[in-house]
């Protein structure tokens, strides 16, 4: 039987809310870094090799930024759920997500059981790969913070 998980207490909620705010702040910081990198990558001539490097860098940064925008939206969604007192509720089964899981991934919308179920379903298609690459972005953000 699954162990019974209690709702998060006030102190835990405050820790997680602060973590979300920190993550959001680190995304804005990363955005500034990306703009600086972009400036350095601009070629001064019309050299084809340099141009293709710039194109590569731009598309790479664009993809990175799109992921950040996506992650920022998830953070905003999580912060909004605080106002409705719904933060930490699994979007699928409605049970409380464990504090330890939220600490590792404060934007988690599913409990670990539902998450594992959905990963099994998605493992053979593209959206499964997408959610895994998002996980890498999250880890990177944590490292840079
Ligand atoms: Zn669940």
Image (cartoon, rainbow, N blue to C red):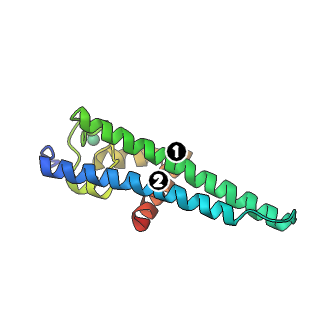
Residue 113, how many percent across, how many down?
29, 47
Q: Is residue 106 above or below residue 45?
A: above
Q: Residues within 10 Å of mark 2 (few under 14, many from 20)?
A: some
Q: Is residue 45 above or below residue 95?
A: below
Of the image marks 1 and 2, the number of the one nearer the N terminus: 2
Tell me the residue at 36%/45% (across/down). 117
Q: Is residue 89 above or below residue 98?
A: above
Which image quarter holds the C terminus? Answer: bottom left
As measured in the structure, the alpha-carbon distance from the residue carrying label 1 to the one carrying label 2 is 26 Å
Q: Is residue 52 above or below residue 75?
A: below
Instruction: Return the residue at label 2.
Output: 28
Secondary structure at badge 1 equals: helix
Camera sees residue 126? yes
Residue 70, how many percent across, how many down?
49, 44
CB at mark 2 closer than 8 A to ligand 1? Answer: no
**Left or right of 110 in this view: 7:** left
Question: Relative to the observer, which residue lies in front, 102 or 30?
Answer: 30
Question: Relative to the observer, which residue lies in front, 68 or 105?
Answer: 68
Tell me the residue at 24%/32% (across/down). 84
Q: Which quadrant of the figure shows ligand 1?
A: top left
Question: Relative to the observer, which residue lies in front, 118 or 88?
Answer: 88
Q: In the picture, residue 104 is in which quadrant?
A: bottom left
**Left or right of 141 in this view: 107:** left
Instruction: Return the residue at label 1.
Output: 127
Tell me the residue at 14%/43% (across/down). 7
Q: Residues within 10 Å of mark 1 (few under 14, many from 20)?
A: few
Residue 120, how many percent across, how many down?
42, 48
Q: In the picture, residue 23 is in which quadrant?
A: bottom left
Image mark count: 2
Question: Which disc number belongs to residue 2?
Answer: none
């Amino acid at each position: 039987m699954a162990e019974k998980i209690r709702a998060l207490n006030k102190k835990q909620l405050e820790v997680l809310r602060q973590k979300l705010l920190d993550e959001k702040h680190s995304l804005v910081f990363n955005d500034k870094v990306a703009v600086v990198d972009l400036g350095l990558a601009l070629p001064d001539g019309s050299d084809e090799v340099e141009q293709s490097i710039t194109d590569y860098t731009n598309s790479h940064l664009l993809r990175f930024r799109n992921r950040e925008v996506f992650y920022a939206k998830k953070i905003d969604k999580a912060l909004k759920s605080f106002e409705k007192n719904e933060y930490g509720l699994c979007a699928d089964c409605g049970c409380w997500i464990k504090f330890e899981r939220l600490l590792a991934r404060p934007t988690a919308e599913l409990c670990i059981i539902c998450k594992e179920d959905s990963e099994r379903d998605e493992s053979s298609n593209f959206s499964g790969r997408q959610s895994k690459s998002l996980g890498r972005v999250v880890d990177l953000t944590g490292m840079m913070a």
